[in-house]
Image (cartoon, rainbow, N blue to C red):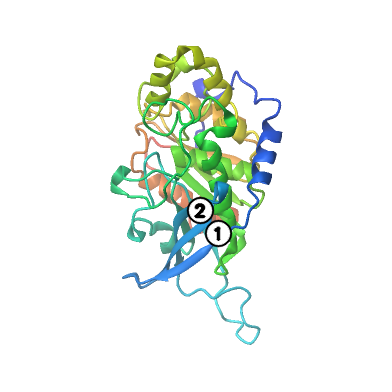
Amino acid sequence: MTGLPDALAGLRSARRAPADFDAFWRDTLDSAAHPLDPVFAEVPSALTAATVYDTSFAGSRGHRIAAWLIVPRPVVPRPAPAADQDAPAPVPCVVQFLGYGEGRGAPLDWLLWPAVGRAVLVVDTRGQGGANLRPGDTPDPVGATHPQVPGFVTRGVLDPAGYYYRDAYVDAVRAVDTALAHPAVDPGRIVVSGCSQGGLLALAAAALHERVAAALVESPFLCDVTDAARLPDRQPYRELLRFCQFHPQHVGRVLDTLAYFDGVALAERATCPALFSLAMRDQVCSPASVATTYNHYAGPKRIGVWPFAGHAEPNGYQRRAEVDFVAGVLGDRPGAHAAPSGAAPVS
């Protein structure tokens, strides 16, 4: 199967991560080492093959982050009783991060992974909800420290220590800890997954948490952000463009801040196996930015290239490729799924 088109195969970022990038994130995570305090409250559900837990945990600054944990039945807590050797073992868990503006929605929205025998932890992004008709349940108590364009991308963007995504990345790391804390989850088989903003958060978790076994990174946002003038005039990049338009004196500070959160720098530090997805007609997260991030990824990697897909468009073939990729990494591979003509789901 083919890989990246020749025009994308050799792309590399013109920017290196700040010299103190690793120290910044080490200090950030050290300062966030408060008790996780996970809560898993089983809720009534019409699902007959899965158990649903209304979940929350202490994210960045101790703020409560909401999630759903959906576990396929039957699963027993680890370890299984010695007298019952046939008891089912704990299952792998996919930690699912969300696209820009999405909330965790309803459990019925997230049944792919339980249907193939994996638990899924669907994690709210602080302050967001409503996109794709999926409400969220997590406020963001942190106030703005300077005038901003409406949205989240410019919140605190003049200082890395106060930037919105600093909290969001910490929340992502602690979401992995939350999955690890549930007795029905196999702690050696944690996968992170997401599209667009969710792909960025999956990259952050893969780079900053040593116990992630695999990453599914689809059309990641905020990658290779080195020149504000080259950003697409589409949401959510439009928020950055408008901020730079109204505050041109701060463009340098904006780019300096974003360097600590750029997906390329995260990719250089992530070593777990990863499956990327690239949509060639994506007008939000450009194919070039996704390819550049993929080219910098430090771990074993594969990519699905979709010549006719746009940003975050439903793609059943990609979902099948993800199911097979996860099975291969975790050692319980099912039969491979065929690719449609003209698509390269893995390479």
**Is residue 90 toward the left or the right of residue 242 in the image?**
right
Q: Is residue 84 above or below residue 21?
A: below
Q: Position of residue 93 (x, y in %)?
A: 53, 59
Mark 2 crowdedness (10 Å alpha carbons): few <14, some 14-19, many ≥20 = many
Q: Nearer the viewer, residue 163 or 93?
A: 163
Instruction: Give the residue type that dot 1 points to.
Output: Ala
Q: Which residue is mark 2?
A: 95
Would residue 54 be seen by someone viewing this image from the given angle? yes
Instruction: Give the residue type that dot 2 points to.
Output: Val
Q: Is residue 97 above or below residue 189?
A: above
Q: How many marks?
A: 2
Q: Nearer the viewer, residue 85 or 247?
A: 247
The quadrant holding residue 116 is bottom left
Mark 1 crowdedness (10 Å alpha carbons): few <14, some 14-19, many ≥20 = many
**Residue drawn where x is 50% and y is 16% of the image:** 251
Q: Residue furthest top?
A: 249
Q: Is residue 199 above or below residue 296?
A: below
Secondary structure category for the residue under label 2: strand
**Residue drawn where x is 34% and y is 57% of the image:** 106
In 3D space, how far apart are the residues under numbered discs 2 and 1 (Cα atoms)?
7 Å
**Residue drawn where x is 64% and y is 33% of the image:** 268
Would residue 344 be seen by someone viewing this image from the given angle? no
The quadrant holding residue 170 is top right
Q: Position of residue 26 (x, y in %)?
A: 69, 40
Q: Position of residue 295 (x, y in %)?
A: 58, 29
Between discs 2 and 1, the one toward the N terminus: 2
Q: Nearer the viewer, residue 287 or 198?
A: 198
Do the residues bearing badges 2 and 1 touch, measured as CB atoms within 8 Å?
yes
**Residue drawn where x is 40% and y is 15% of the image:** 245
Q: Which mark is residue 54?
A: none
Secondary structure category for the residue under label 1: helix
Q: Which mark is residue 179?
A: 1
